[in-house]
């Protein structure tokens, strides 16, 4: 296992206040002072949050405190840069003291981007990259409704660029929310398929952070607890969506996964997932889940001890097993989950053919921000081969 040199510094940024637990949504009003004095607030919401009445519950609390509310809803899943520009244009001439994002990663990322676009007169694409946001945004609160992205605690926001057939992130401490509300009751109606895909996204954040070249004690702590909680409850939440305990584990595990990736960064799984989302619209969690066992098998020789430690956290029986055997068992377990969670194993289902492999590999090879975190270097041929394994 990689040991840190004593001269190495590591750091962790996080929101100012996180309130978690069943019914936490109703405590929002009591914690709003973290956002500063408020007269007018923008709520950016996924459509399911409006439909299920959660935005009404937020508006009710705010209006009860004399705060006026503007609701922007119907955020499309995996938004494009153009979608974000259209949302911004719809707010032309309006001003807000804070933004509240509620929904899946797509709605939260849209809310985070809007919070900085309202104070930076640049286009969304100008923000894509690391540390390109100049001015602080307006203060934000994030309330996740999927247990997947961990976006509520990350300084990242991801958009799709359809012309370039890629997904790409803006990374900036100005994207970090001030307040986070984690209420598992918001996730009770999450459909099975989305529970599976988002749960595997969260697990990928934790495992990739744990084996990242930038792994460090902060990231490791969050990653191992994330792996433990998600492994314990993933199948239960999938099979029994109304199990509040399992939903609570998933939501907390997903937040810890976001914290782990904030500290240590994700790696090749995410780099290879982005072109699958950008070009073939494969949902982010599905793309990650398909790739995860294959990329871990590729990395295996460089990370045997780390995979063995992950196996213990996953609850895999490691008694009497060597590190190598435990590492193999961890990879096998991930493959078994994806089958039990009915996550497709074949890219052809999404229209990918052999003719696409070269283009996909070239697109992924450009995601150097994440590939640099991978414990084993990937050549173009390695990437092509990994995608090829998903065309059985
Ligand atoms: N910012 C980050 O750090 C980060 C990390 C990973 C992924 N992402 C990005 O987040 C996006 C994906 O987010 P996601 O996986 O959470 O999915 P999502 O937000 O796209 O939501 C998926 C679907 O689930 C529905 N939904 C959400 N919550 C629901 C609920 N409680 N009940 C019923 N339906 C619900 C949505 O309406 C949508 O149709 C991608 O663009 C991905 O690239 C961001
Ligand atoms: Fe992710």
Image (cartoon, rainbow, N blue to C red):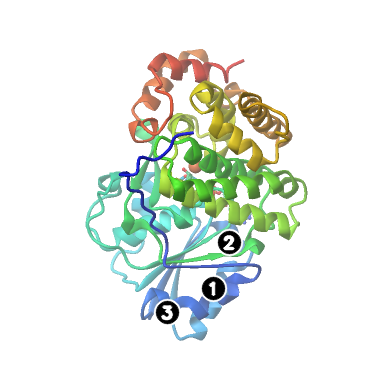
Residue at (38, 57) in percent of width and height: 13
Foreground residue among 245 and 69:
245
The answer to the question of whether label 2 and label 1 lie on touching residues, with beta carbons closer than 8 A, is no
Foreground residue among 123 and 273:
273
Helix, strand or loop at label 1? It is helix
Closer to the observer: label 3 or label 2? 3
Residue at (73, 43) in percent of width and height: 235
Quarter of the image where one finds residue 383: top left
Please, is residue 361 above or below residue 151 in the view? above
Farthest residue to the front: give it: 6
Label number found at residue 58: 1
Q: Residues within 10 Å of mark 2 (few under 14, many from 20)?
A: many
Q: In the displayed structure, does residue 389 sit left or right of residue 85?
A: right
Quarter of the image where one finds residue 125: top left
Helix, strand or loop at label 3? It is helix
Residue 54, image x, y percentages: 59, 67
Residue identifier under label 2? 49
The answer to the question of whether label 3 and label 1 lie on touching residues, with beta carbons closer than 8 A, is no
Label number found at residue 390: none
Of mark 2 and mark 1, the one earlier in the sequence is 2
Please, is residue 309 above or below residue 384 in the view? below
Of mark 3 and mark 1, the one earlier in the sequence is 3
The answer to the question of whether label 3 and label 2 lie on touching residues, with beta carbons closer than 8 A, is no
Residue identifier under label 3? 33
Residue 233, image x, y percentages: 70, 48
Q: Is residue 79 visible?
A: no
Of mark 3 and mark 2, the one earlier in the sequence is 3
Helix, strand or loop at label 2? It is helix
């Amino acid at each position: 296992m990689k040991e840190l040199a004593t001269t190495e510094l590591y750091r962790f940024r996080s929101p100012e206040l996180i309130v978690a637990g069943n019914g936490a949504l109703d405590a929002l009003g009591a914690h709003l002072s973290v956002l500063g004095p408020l007269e007018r607030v923008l709520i950016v919401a996924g459509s399911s949050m409006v439909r299920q009445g959660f935005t009404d519950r937020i508006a009710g609390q705010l209006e009860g405190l004399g705060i006026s509310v503007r609701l922007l809803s119907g955020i499309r899943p995996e938004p494009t840069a153009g979608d974000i520009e259209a949302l911004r244009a719809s707010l032309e001439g309006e001003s807000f003291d804070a933004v509240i994002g509620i929904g899946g990663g797509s709605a939260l990322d849209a809310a985070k981007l809007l919070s900085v676009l309202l104070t930076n007169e640049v286009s969304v694409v100008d923000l894509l990259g690391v540390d390109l946001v100049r001015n602080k945004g307006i203060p934000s609160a994030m309330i996740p409704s999927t247990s997947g992205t961990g976006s509520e605690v990350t300084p990242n926001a991801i958009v799709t660029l359809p012309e370039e057939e890629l997904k790409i992130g803006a990374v900036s401490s100005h994207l970090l929310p001030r307040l986070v509300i984690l209420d598992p009751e918001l996730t009770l109606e999450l459909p099975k398929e989305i529970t599976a895909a988002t749960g595997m996204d969260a697990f990928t954040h934790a495992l990739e952070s744990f084996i990242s070249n930038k792994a460090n004690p902060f990231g490791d702590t969050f990653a191992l607890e994330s792996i433990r909680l998600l492994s314990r409850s993933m199948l239960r939440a999938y099979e029994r969506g109304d199990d509040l305990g399992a939903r609570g584990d998933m939501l907390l595990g997903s937040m810890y996964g976001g914290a782990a990736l904030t500290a240590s960064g994700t790696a090749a799984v995410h780099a290879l997932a982005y072109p699958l989302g950008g070009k073939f619209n494969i949902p982010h969690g599905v793309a990650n889940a398909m790739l995860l066992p294959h990329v871990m098998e590729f990395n295996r020789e460089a990370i045997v001890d780390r995979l063995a430690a992950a196996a213990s956290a996953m609850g895999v029986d490691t008694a009497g097993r060597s590190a190598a055997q435990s590492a193999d068992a961890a990879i096998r377990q991930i493959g078994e989950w994806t089958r039990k969670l009915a996550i497709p194993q074949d890219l052809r289902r999404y229209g990918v053919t052999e003719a696409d492999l070269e283009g996909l590999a070239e697109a992924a090879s450009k995601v150097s921000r994440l590939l640099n975190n991978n414990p084993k270097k990937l050549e173009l041929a390695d990437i092509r081969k990994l995608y090829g394994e998903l065309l059985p």
